[in-house]
Structure formats: C-alpha cells, structure tokens
Amino acid sequence: METTLEPAAESLLSVRDLTVTYPGRGFRSPGFTVLHGVDAELGGGRTLGLVGESGSGKSTLGRAILGLAPVSGGTITFDGRDISHATRADRRRLSRDLQVVFQDPYSSLNPALTVGDILAEPLSVQGIGVRQAQGRIAELLDHVGLPADAVDRLPREFSGGQRQRVAIARALALRPKLIVCDEPVSALDLSTQARVLDLLLNIQQETGVSYLFVSHDLDVVRHISHDIAVMTGGRIVEHGPARQVTGDPQHPYTRRLLMASPVIDPDQQAARREERRRARDDERAA
C-alpha cells in the first residue's frame, strides 16, 4: 500500500513525486532507485517525523532536501523556491534558512576547533562581523543550555549530549526556517535523549523553526512530531497526525515498528513478540 501526504495549510516544504536513483558503477550496471515517487508536506513551525528501519529511504529523503543526494525525478519546493537541482551557490544562500543536525555529535564537529570557532564559522561565511558574531554565539550557548566558557573548549571536553547541543547551536546560528534532524539522538542514552528532545521542543516553541525529524524509533518520533510519515522500501506507507499513527496504526509495517519499541515488563515483552509475529504475517499478506 502506497500513500501520499495531503498539502499543509501553509507549506514550508513540499516534496512531490520525488525519485532518487544512484547510477550504476559500470556501463552495463543498472542504477539503484532508493526513493520511489515520494510525496511529503511540512508546514511552518511544525515537525514531520520520518520513521523507518535502516534502508527504508528516510535518510535519503533528508539528504535529497539538503542537496546531498541526486534528484532523478519530481520536485522539492522550499519556502516557495524549487530547490530540486539547486547549484552550489544556491545552496550557500539556502544555508541561512535550511540547516541540519547529524546523528553523531562528535564526527560532525571539527575536533580541532573550539566551540566558539565552530559556532563562528557559519556566521563568518555569511559575512557577519566579529563583534556581532560574538554576541550571537553567547545567545546560542545560553539557548542550548551550555555555559559561557564553552567557547574556549574543544568538543572532546564535552559529553555526547553536550556535543549534540553544540551541533544544535551551530544549526540555529543563522536562524533557519527548517532543520533536518537526521537521527539526532540515536547515539545518546535514554535520559540524554529525553533532554535533547525537550530542548528541541523548547527551541521550536521559542523560534517557530520547523523540523524534519528522521529516526528509526517510533517512540522518539511520537514524542516530538506533529505528524508522522512511515517509510519502507523507499515509499511512504502511512502518514497522519502523530497521535493517530501511533495510537491506531493502519499499516502492518507501522504496527511492527510500534511493537519493536522496548518495554521492561516480561509479560509485555512476550505480548510484543507475539504482536510482532502477527504484524510480520500481515505485512507479508498486504
């Protein structure tokens, strides 16, 4: 079963019939299609959770929006502009409004730079002066709950959760309209995950930024998203309000993802295993 998302009332991001195909390695090698005619809509100030297992195509969709994966067909419209085939110069201009937070908060930060230099970099690229940048950096550190003296410290001096706060601060530096969050809490322990998710929610309430939140964990997506799109095999198979998708899932694959969420009680674990088995049987029959 394949589905599409209905247009949002005030769409910030609109993906229509998006196809991503990577070319083959040789003359006779066919290309490999990762996304098959995907539709998605995201309104201003809202979060669309994109959930699916590894290889489902969810990260590829985020990468295509960021210009990091080739668009073979369809369109991506951001803030009224077609960015499907944006040039490098276009992408530089877009960086003010479109940012990303990656999964690993250590490898995504330059280990040789202090936090102050990491946060100053996007400001400098956009021509923001040193004095103004210093004020903005102080605001950003306060915004993400890091001490002022963090400016002089290196990423290795921080915990994983703190490093992800630095990455979030960097993404916020230019006051973007949309942040693509690609598995931003999957490398963190559960208590740290909760604090980072709450931080993202607070930032959205204060700034009105939109998130495309990519994750394999339906529980995490449910916590932060207004709407959820479920992906498998490069297609969206279910979408809707977060409460509806997680409370009354219609597609067998969504039910299987929901049943994969960890629980502590042994009886619940046994019930979940049986429900997962039934969901897999339903999915094969769908």
Image (cartoon, rainbow, N blue to C red):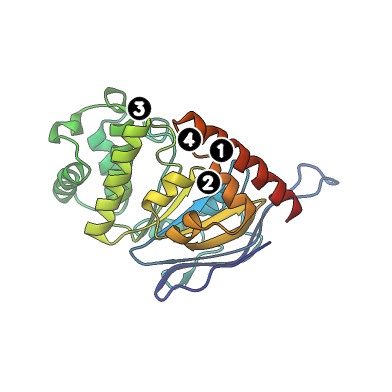
Question: CA separation, marks 4 and 2?
Answer: 9 Å
Where residue 225 appears, as percent x and y from the top left, is 40, 55
Count the marks: 4
Under circle 1, the secondary element is helix
| Proximity of marks 4 and 2: CB atoms separated by less than 8 Å | no
The quadrant where residue 146 appears: top left
Q: Residue placed farthest to the right in the image?
A: 28
Where residue 230 appears, as percent x and y from the top left, is 56, 54
Q: Nearer the viewer, residue 221 or 260?
A: 260
Q: Which residue is mark 2?
A: 258
Residue visible at 28% across and 56% down? 204
> Which quadrant holds the C terminus?
bottom right
Please state which amino acid type lies under the numbered disc 1. Answer: Ala
Where residue 15 appears, as percent x and y from the top left, is 54, 66
Q: Nearer the viewer, residue 31 or 217?
A: 217
Question: CA separation, marks 4 and 1?
Answer: 12 Å
- Mark 2 vs mark 1, foreground winner is 1
| Proximity of marks 2 and 3: CB atoms separated by less than 8 Å | no
- Horizontal placement of 176 versus 222: left or right? left
Please state which amino acid type lies under the numbered disc 2. Answer: Leu
Q: Which residue is mark 3?
A: 111
Question: CA separation, marks 3 and 4?
Answer: 34 Å
Q: Earlier in the sequence, mark 4 or mark 1?
A: 4
Question: CA separation, marks 2 and 3?
Answer: 37 Å
Q: Which residue is mark 4?
A: 262
The quadrant where residue 43 appears: bottom left
Under circle 4, the secondary element is loop
| Proximity of marks 3 and 1: CB atoms separated by less than 8 Å | no
Q: Which residue is mark 1?
A: 271
Please state which amino acid type lies under the numbered disc 3. Answer: Pro
